[in-house]
Image (cartoon, rainbow, N blue to C red):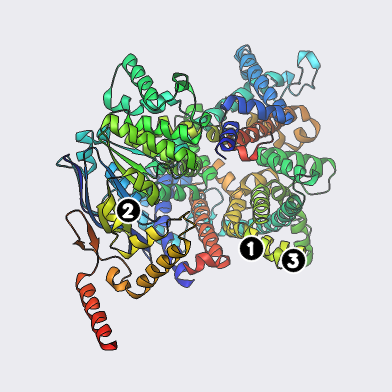
């Protein structure tokens, strides 16, 4: 009985990396997604460095709406005569940069607050949870739209901060419930008795045990946040007009002529968005299986 | 042997909330007025069924649980409050061994990190000395040096419990609260771990507060025993007091419930059990108050032996039986 | 039960207070005031100052706050300076459209989500199950906006099966004609939103059905010889629907607040489009009123969810 238990344990508790490797090898879609996302990310961030600013800033009405393939524009040009491919790369970089920073920030805030609530419990927990519940009731998207319009110094950084300030709550409940489960385990008590400070117990003892769950959650949230950014920019409340994002490229589709006759001005960005979000979700699902081995395919 | 730790009238009550504004509507009396003391180098046994409050007492002694009232006095110093405990570096001297060896070891940490945690926080040795100390501890608990950088899941239950012991003794504590340290282990491994604990006690002069529901194990380990039921002590005494001359009906019932492999006296044992059960049914009020809980005051049976019962009622009842016997004659 | 509802509604008061304070603060931070729209070369600046003072804009913030709350309670939200109409009238015109759209969306959502989950759970691990799992993970991740565009492109412009904007045909006549035209306009957007939003219902119901399958109450029913069909619908399905029922309030709110995108893309004149256009034109009276409306709605949604939970789950009702 003891022997058998030990073996089961050892099977389920090998390192994160080897578990991830095994899950990805069992899920071909996940593996392809991982390759697609990593190579696209590398391509976009490297290629964006080499695109001169004038390519996506200067407007040249003469070259407006060139069809793909004409005069060296692989994906054609947009309403300002700018090269679609260059625009697409730069816009993707901006969108991804914002979504990723936003996701990382909200995750960190969610971790700090969720760990605190779950670890200390009692009144601290009660207060934090009532506040989060209330804030989650607020219509986030609408508030972001309004706040964006009243902030004077407005750029990518303020956008990320506004975004974060109005939706950091999403991760708190998740981290809190994970922390509560861990806090009931004896190793946390042992750590307290070993003279470790609450901060050390939270960060050194509990946090590593949450990491795989957090990573899976972070990945899945990233997909949702790309959607948020695209949506806001599409409505015109994302980045300032001079900064392009996948959402601002989609805006061109609002014009029925563009939508039906000039597919090249909006379809590529729609496809990039689809590709990224679908791939990220399938990676997130593999990571979730890594975190929670009961769902394992292996 | 001097007194190491004394518990004075300890009470731990949990509020039950409910009603309109989440008011406190009732209380759970997890521990309700318990006093005892542990001497240097001795093993004190705390016995009771699950939910009797024995684990709560253990947790309060190490400082994981807050006392509602009463005192914990360690070497003459009041250590009931967290501030007092911090000032004394109390947990350097008082440590704990947990029941579930798996959950008491962080799966993400190596054995080295687990054992060195208290040393890091309390002793603040340099890296070399710390490593030497961990190696020494592994040696004491009989695990090879190479296990230092392995993870908890790579060990069997018995081995993990030894790692837990190594962590508990790493700062040379004076008292270890062992909360059901072997109940999760197989029988064969239990004896091994128990003997090993005894060995350590002999070599290092540590006191144990041994919490268990298993009278057999407690008999093997302890000098003095307290029997708990529903948050109160029902009987206190030396091992012989409790096992050879049980006074409280609860103790008697516990002892009668120990499975016997003695086939020759099977009928006799059965008769004994029935007799005790009858006594329990007839004389409940000698041992339990109207609220169904044991009486809060302890009557001296001898210098070392105490029992919780209603002294007046007991005497009265005995007199009445005498009278009845007289009448029926 | 009544005590529970009362308690839950009372809990709304501090929430409402906090929310209104927050919205009031945002409203105060917005540049401009009700008289901004009256700027004209003829207007005397001292006259403007007098008007402002008369309207109480120089009072301390708490006085203004309570006056604002009082007005809101009486249904006075001021005038839109862009459209020169009372905000209430404006909202009234749009609210009907949004309600029709949300209602259809809600019906379609449950109509899609529940059978999807049942089919998946009944065929666990088989092709149908894997298909719906994949479908839902895609709809979870993909921004609805992009799908709206594709749907509009395909069914609206290319195939021309559905209208691409508006809420009703101008030449529709008669009660039946107008309503048919209205329904015709909401079908494409509501079906699309519903199809994209099933993930919550699907996941909860599917997991519930699979988990409950091995619960004691289902096994007991089976042991008693209850027919499988009856076990599934009467015992398993009913219990698995509890979380779905409980979530109803939040679901409605999500559909209402989510209407911003769909109304913008399908150019459907509802509350969402009103909000969008008033932000674009900085029509602050409308913005503030709409924020208040949506905020209040989400509080009511949360209360509704809690009451439904108490109503369907005796464990909550009794304790």
Please report, as a chain letter, where disc 2 is located.
Answer: C
What label does residue C230 carry, if any? Answer: 3
Q: Is residue A221 left or right of residue A64?
A: left
Is residue A240 in view? no
Is residue A211 in view? yes
Calculate the distance from the C-alpha at mark 3 to the C-alpha at mark 1: 13 Å
First in sequence, mark 3 or 2: give its number: 2
Please report, as a chain letter, where disc 3 is located.
Answer: C
Q: Of A270 and C265, which appears nearest the observer?
A: A270
Nearer the observer: mark 2 or 1; the answer is 1
Neighbourhood count class around disc 1 (C-alpha, 10 Å): few under 14, some 14–19, many 20 upward: some
Please report, as a chain letter, where disc 1 is located.
Answer: C
- Residue A142 location, x and y as percent? 53, 45
Calculate the distance from the C-alpha at mark 3 to the C-alpha at mark 2: 61 Å
Quarter of the figure that contains the N terminus of chain A: top right
Question: Badge 2 is on which residue?
Answer: C62
First in sequence, mark 3 or 1: give its number: 1
Q: Seen from this angle, which residue lies furthest left? A: B76
Instruction: Name which residue lies at 64% across and 59% down.
Output: C241
Mark 1 residue element: helix
Question: Badge 1 is on which residue?
Answer: C217
Pointers 3 and 2 within a single chain: yes
Calculate the distance from the C-alpha at mark 2 to the C-alpha at mark 1: 57 Å
- Residue C39 location, x and y as percent? 46, 43
Q: Quadrant of residue B196?
A: top left
- Residue C243 location, x and y as percent? 60, 57
Q: Seen from this angle, which residue lies furthest right? A: C159
Mark 3 residue element: helix
Q: Is residue C124 left or right of residue B127?
A: right
Q: Are marks 3 and 2 in contact (CB under 8 Å)?
A: no
């Amino acid at each position: 009985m003891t022997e058998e238990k030990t073996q089961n344990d050892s099977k389920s508790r090998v390192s994160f990396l080897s578990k991830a490797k095994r899950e990805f090898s069992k899920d071909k879609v996940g593996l392809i997604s991982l390759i697609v996302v990593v190579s696209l990310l590398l391509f976009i961030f490297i290629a964006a460095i080499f695109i001169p600013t004038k390519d996506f800033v200067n407007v040249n009405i003469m070259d407006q709406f060139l069809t793909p393939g004409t005069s060296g524009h692989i994906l054609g040009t947009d309403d300002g005569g700018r090269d679609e491919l260059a625009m697409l790369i730069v816009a993707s970089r901006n969108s991804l940069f914002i979504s990723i920073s936003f996701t990382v920030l909200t995750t960190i805030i969610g971790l700090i607050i969720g760990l605190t609530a779950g670890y200390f419990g009692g009144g601290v927990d009660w207060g934090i949870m009532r506040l989060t519940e209330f804030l989650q009731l607020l219509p986030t998207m609408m508030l972001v739209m309004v706040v964006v319009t009243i902030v004077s110094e407005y750029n990518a950084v303020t956008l990320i901060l506004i975004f974060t300030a109005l939706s950091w709550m999403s991760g708190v409940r998740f981290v809190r419930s994970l922390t509560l489960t861990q806090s009931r385990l004896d190793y946390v008590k042992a750590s307290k008795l070993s003279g470790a400070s609450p901060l050390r117990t939270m960060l050194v003892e509990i946090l590593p045990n949450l990491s795989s769950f957090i990573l899976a959650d972070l990945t899945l949230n990233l997909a949702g946040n790309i959607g948020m950014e695209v949506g806001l920019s599409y409505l015109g409340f994302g980045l300032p007009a001079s900064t392009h994002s996948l959402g601002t490229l989609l805006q061109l589709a609002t014009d029925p002529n563009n939508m039906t006759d000039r597919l090249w001005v909006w379809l590529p960005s729609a496809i990039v968005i689809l590709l990224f979000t679908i791939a990220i979700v399938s990676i997130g699902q593999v990571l979730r299986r890594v975190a929670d081995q009961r769902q394992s395919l292996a | 042997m001097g007194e190491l730790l004394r518990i004075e009238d300890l009470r731990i009550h949990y509020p039950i909330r409910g009603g309109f504004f989440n008011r406190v509507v009732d209380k759970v009396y997890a521990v309700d007025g318990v006093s005892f003391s542990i001497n240097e180098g001795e093993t004190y046994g705390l016995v009771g069924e699950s939910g009797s409050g024995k684990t709560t007492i253990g947790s309060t002694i190490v400082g994981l649980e807050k006392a509602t009232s009463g005192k914990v006095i360690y070497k003459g110093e009041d250590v009931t409050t967290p501030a007092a405990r911090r000032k004394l570096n109390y947990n350097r001297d008082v440590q704990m061994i947990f029941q579930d060896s798996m959950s008491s070891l962080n799966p993400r940490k190596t054995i080295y990190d687990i054992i060195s945690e208290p040393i890091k926080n309390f002793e603040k040795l340099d890296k070399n000395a710390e490593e030497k100390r961990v190696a020494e501890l592994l040696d004491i608990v009989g695990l090879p040096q190479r296990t230092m950088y392995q993870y908890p899941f790579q060990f069997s239950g018995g081995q993990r419990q030894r790692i837990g012991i190594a962590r508990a003794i790493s700062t040379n504590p004076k008292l270890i609260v062992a909360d059901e340290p072997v109940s999760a282990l197989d029988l064969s491994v239990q004896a091994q771990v128990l003997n090993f604990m005894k060995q350590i006690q002999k070599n290092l002069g540590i006191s144990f507060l041994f919490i268990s529901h298993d009278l057999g194990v407690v008999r093997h380990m302890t000098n003095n025993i307290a029997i708990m039921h529903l948050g109160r002590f029902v009987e206190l005494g030396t091992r012989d007091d409790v096992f050879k001359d049980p006074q409280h009906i609860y103790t008697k019932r516990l002892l009668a419930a120990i499975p016997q492999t003695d086939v020759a006296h099977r009928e006799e044992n059965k008769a004994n059990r029935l007799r005790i059960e009858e006594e329990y049914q007839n004389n409940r009020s000698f041992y339990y108050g109207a609220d169904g809980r044991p009486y809060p005051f302890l009557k001296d049976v001898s210098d070392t032996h105490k029992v919780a019962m209603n002294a007046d009622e007991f005497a009265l009842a005995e007199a009445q039986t005498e009278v009845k016997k007289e009448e029926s004659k | 039960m009544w005590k529970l509802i009362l308690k839950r509604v009372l809990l709304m008061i501090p929430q409402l207070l906090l929310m209104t304070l927050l919205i009031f603060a945002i409203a105060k931070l917005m540049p401009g005031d009700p008289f901004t729209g009256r700027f004209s070369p003829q207007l005397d600046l001292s006259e403007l100052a007098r008007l402002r003072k008369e309207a109480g804009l120089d009072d301390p913030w708490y006085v203004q706050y309570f006056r604002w709350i009082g007005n809101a309670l009486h249904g006075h939200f001021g005038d839109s300076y862009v459209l020169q109409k009372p905000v209430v009238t404006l909202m009234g015109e749009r609210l009907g459209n949004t309600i029709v759209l949300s209602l259809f969306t809600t019906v379609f959502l449950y109509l899609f989500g529940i059978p999807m989950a049942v089919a998946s759970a009944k065929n666990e691990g088989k092709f149908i199950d894997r298909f719906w799992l994949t479908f839902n993970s895609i709809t979870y991740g993909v921004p609805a906006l992009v799908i709206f565009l594709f749907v509009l492109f395909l069914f609206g412009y290319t195939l021309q099966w559905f209208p691409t904007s508006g809420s009703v045909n101008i030449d529709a006549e008669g009660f039946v004609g107008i309503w048919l035209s209205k329904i015709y306009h909401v079908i494409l957007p509501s079906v699309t939103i519903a199809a994209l939003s099933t993930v919550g219902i699907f996941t909860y119901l599917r997991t519930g059905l699979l988990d409950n399958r091995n619960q004691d109450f289902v096994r007991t029913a089976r042991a008693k010889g209850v027919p499988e069909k009856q076990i599934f619908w009467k015992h398993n399905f009913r219990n698995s629907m509890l979380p779905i029922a409980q979530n109803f309030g939040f679901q409605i709110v999500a559909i209402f607040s989510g209407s911003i995108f769909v109304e913008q893309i399908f150019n459907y004149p509802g509350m969402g489009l009103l909000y969008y256009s008033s932000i674009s034109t900085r029509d602050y009276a409308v913005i503030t009123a709409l924020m208040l409306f949506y905020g209040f709605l989400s509080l009511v949604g949360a209360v509704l969810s809690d009451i439904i939970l108490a109503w369907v789950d005796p464990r909550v009702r009794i304790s």
